[in-house]
Image: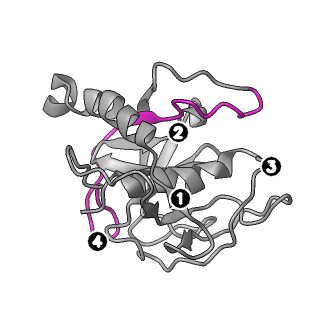
């Protein structure tokens, strides 16, 4: 089971594609199509690349709250941008649930509580490339654990250079993303609150 570490790591890199930051960026390594077990990453699009996310339920995607926009579509099973790929699926977003404590910043400098759950119009069809990320109730990694990161975020800094294919940064190579205890707290207090409601269980 790939725990919450991959969720947070994916959001850290993939979601950075929607904003410009002055912080250090990582160098890219091209991931091959379907290289992540189950193809956990999904792509949020509004006319073009906006953000990345993770399928946590056939009808739910976990992403960042700063990606909140009207008319979002989720492209599942994507690897290369700009072309239709075999096996990809597209779903409309019908409901957005940002963290109640998130406050949007015009400069994207505030990342506190920057997490959001999206409800898809219809269920994703699970395949070899499209699977949900199994979330653990009691098996979070300990603080300080290093994670792997993937996404379509910029690969250079300070210049912005967005890749056309999904990028992958292996553990202990180019990028070290430690797990923080506060992430685990927010995860249990917010995400599970939504996932375990009667509405989500019955629908």
Label 2's element? loop
Disc 1 marks which residue?
177
Q: CA distance from mark 3 to mark 2?
A: 19 Å
Residue 61 vertical placement versus 78 (above, below): above
Query: Which residue is rendered at x = 59% and y = 31% of the image?
Result: 69
Q: Quadrant of residue 158?
A: bottom right
> From the image, which quarter does the C terminus lie in?
top left
| Element marked by disc 1 | strand
**As drawn, 57 above or below 158:** above
* Quadrant including the N terminus: bottom left
Front label number (3 vs 4): 3
**Upstream in the sequence, badge 4 or badge 1?**
4
Q: Earlier in the sequence, mark 1 or mark 3?
A: 3
**Which mark sits nearer the N-terminus, 2 or 4?**
2
Q: Residue furthest right?
A: 159
Q: Is 176 left or right of 91, judged from the image as shown? A: right
Q: Position of residue 103 (x, y in %)?
A: 60, 21
Label 1 vs label 3, nearer the camera: 1
Q: Secondary structure at mark 3?
A: loop
Circle 3 residue? 22
**Location of mark 2 (residue):** 64
Magenta stretch: give its range. 106-132
Q: CA distance from mark 3 to mark 4?
A: 37 Å
Is 126 covered by the magenta stretch?
yes
Residue 18 in view here:
yes
Mark 4 element type: loop
Which sits earlier in the primary sequence, circle 3 or circle 4? 3
Residue assigned mark 4: 128
The Cα atoms of the two marked residues, 2 and 4, are separated by 25 Å
Residue 60 lies in quadrant:
top left
Q: Residues within 10 Å of mark 2 (few under 14, many from 20)?
A: many
Residue 120 visible in the picture: no
């Amino acid at each position: 089971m790939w725990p919450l570490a991959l969720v947070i790591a994916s959001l850290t890199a993939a979601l950075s594609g929607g904003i410009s930051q002055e912080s250090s960026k990582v160098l890219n390594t091209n991931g091959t199509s379907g290289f992540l077990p189950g193809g956990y990453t999904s792509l949020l699009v509004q006319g073009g690349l906006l953000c990345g996310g993770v399928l946590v339920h056939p009808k739910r995607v976990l992403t960042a709250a700063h990606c909140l926009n009207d008319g979002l579509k989720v492209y599942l099973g994507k690897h290369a941008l700009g072309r239709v790929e075999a096996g990809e699926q597209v779903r409309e977003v019908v409901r957005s649930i940002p963290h109640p404590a998130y406050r949007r910043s015009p400069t994207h400098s505030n990342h506190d509580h920057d997490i959001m759950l999206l409800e898809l119009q219809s269920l994703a069809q699970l395949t070899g490339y499209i699977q949900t990320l199994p979330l653990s109730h009691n098996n979070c990694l300990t603080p300080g654990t290093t994670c792997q990161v993937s996404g379509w975020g910029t690969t250079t800094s300070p210049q912005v250079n967005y890749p056309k294919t999904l990028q992958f940064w292996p553990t202990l190579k180019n990028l070290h993303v430690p797990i923080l205890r506060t992430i685990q707290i927010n995860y249990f207090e917010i995400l599970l609150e939504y996932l375990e409601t009667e509405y989500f269980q019955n629908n």
